[in-house]
Image: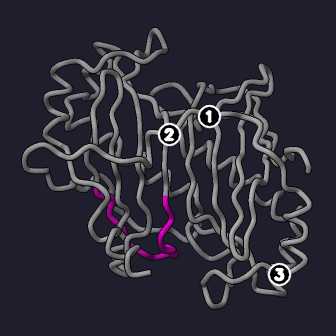
């Protein structure tokens, strides 16, 4: 058995922080995406390997927890532990840590598959790559509580609302990585873009935020990458609420590739109301809760359920 491997070292820039004053979720994933190049090299999937063999690995699912805030100027490290491998898949965990305190700020549980860049489908691992993965397998060093995102969703009471469009646009060429599709952290960017429209429908406007210091913070994201998006593809993000608790919301996003008609990704998200002065979770105000209840939608999306059943 091996230990966790160090794949990233960097810092938080001010432009990576959002209106809540902390590192935006897309940049947690951007730092992980940067570190993934180091991991691929450890496994023998260097740029030269990818060019010569048309082989890489791509993510199909990522479950993330956001445990502590990070702010501009904080320095960070990412360590990764490879947990399981089979014919076409590898599961691993990554921890993004505050390098000053040593505490874990976010953790990621990731599934990747061996990927043929010409056929654009999962294939068995090359023997030498699988051998390297097996040589780095280790035990998970944390004991997380069971997740909320990604689990069963309570039945919607009454007539469910129709998901509404919270983001719309197109994939730019610069947003695509060396594998020829939109980089993983930009899926999170699309989900982040939709948050403002959800908050607005719940009555948490910019004016209300300034007056009452009401904000929000992500706690968990369960993202399933279902189909690639390429430069020029147009998309729409369709969203709605899944559940409400005392301090937390659970909502779902479905990223549609409007160029192909496919669902590109789904997001099951848990976030909390956040006191921007006390920097802690706060109860959901009654007026916000009343408006949020009208945004409840069924989950998962029926198109996704049908697509998965057909596989």
Which element carries disc 2, helix, strand or loop?
loop
Mark 2 burial class by Cα count in 10 Å: few <14, some 14-19, many 20+: some
Disc 1: which residue: 144
Q: Residue at x 77, y 78 (%)?
A: 125
Quarter residue 104 falls in: top right
Q: Residue at x 19, y 34 (%)?
A: 292
Quarter residue 19 falls in: top left
**Where 40 sits versus 156, above or below?**
below
Q: Residue at x 90, y 66 (%)?
A: 132
Q: Residue 230: within the magenta?
A: yes
Quarter residue 202 falls in: top left
Instruction: Measure the alpha-carbon separation of dots 3 and 2.
Output: 33 Å
Disc 3: which residue: 126
Residues tagged 1 and 2 counted as in contact (Cβ below 8 A)? yes
Mark 3 burial class by Cα count in 10 Å: few <14, some 14-19, many 20+: some
Disc 2: which residue: 147
Question: Residue 217 in the image: x percent, y percent?
Answer: 45, 29
Which element carries disc 3, helix, strand or loop?
loop
Decide which of tag 1 and tag 3 comes sooner along the chain.
Answer: 3
Q: Nearer the viewer, residue 159 or 34?
A: 159
Q: Nearer the viewer, residue 254 or 25?
A: 254
Question: Residue 137 in the image: x percent, y percent?
Answer: 84, 55
User: In screen coordinates, is 218 left or right of 119?
Assistant: left
Instruction: Measure the alpha-carbon separation of dots 1 and 3.
Output: 32 Å
Decide which of tag 3 and tag 2 comes sooner along the chain.
Answer: 3
Q: Residue 105: within the magenta?
A: no
Q: Residue at x 81, y 64 (%)?
A: 40
Q: Which residues are magenta?
A: 224-238
User: In screen coordinates, is 154 left or right of 26?
Assistant: left
Residues tagged 3 and 2 counted as in contact (Cβ below 8 A)? no
Q: Nearer the viewer, residue 21 or 114?
A: 114
Which element carries disc 1, helix, strand or loop?
loop
């Amino acid at each position: 058995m091996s230990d966790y491997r160090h794949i990233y070292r960097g810092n938080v820039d001010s432009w990576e922080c959002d209106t809540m004053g902390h590192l935006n979720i897309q940049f947690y994933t951007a730092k992980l995406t940067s570190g993934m190049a180091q991991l691929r090299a450890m496994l023998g999937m260097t740029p030269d390997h990818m060019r010569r063999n048309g082989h890489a690995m791509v993510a199909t699912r990522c479950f993330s927890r956001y445990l502590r805030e990070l702010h501009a100027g904080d320095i960070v490290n990412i360590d990764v532990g490879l947990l399981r491998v089979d014919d076409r898949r590898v599961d691993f965990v990554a921890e993004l840590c505050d390098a000053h305190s040593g505490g874990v700020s976010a953790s990621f549980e990731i599934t990747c598959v061996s990927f043929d860049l010409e056929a654009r489908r999962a294939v068995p691992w090359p023997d030498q790559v699988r051998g390297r993965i097996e040589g780095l397998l280790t035990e998970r060093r944390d004991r997380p509580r069971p997740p909320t995102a990604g689990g069963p969703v309570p039945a919607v009471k009454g007539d469910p609302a129709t998901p509404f469009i919270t983001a719309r646009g197109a994939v730019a060429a610069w947003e695509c990585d060396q594998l020829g599709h939109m980089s993983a952290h930009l899926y999170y960017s699309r989900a982040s873009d939709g948050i403002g429209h959800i908050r607005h429908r719940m009555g948490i406007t910019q004016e209300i935020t300034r007056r009452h210091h009401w904000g929000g913070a992500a706690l968990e994201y369960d993202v399933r990458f279902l189909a690639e998006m390429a430069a020029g593809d147009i998309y729409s993000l369709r969203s709605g609420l899944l559940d409400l608790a005392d301090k937390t919301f659970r909502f779902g996003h479905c990223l549609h590739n409007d160029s192909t008609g496919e669902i590109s990704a789904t997001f099951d998200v848990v976030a909390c109301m956040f006191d921007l002065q006390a920097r802690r979770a706060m109860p959901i105000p009654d007026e916000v809760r009343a408006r949020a209840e009208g945004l409840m939608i069924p989950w998962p999306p029926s198109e996704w359920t049908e697509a998965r059943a057909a596989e």
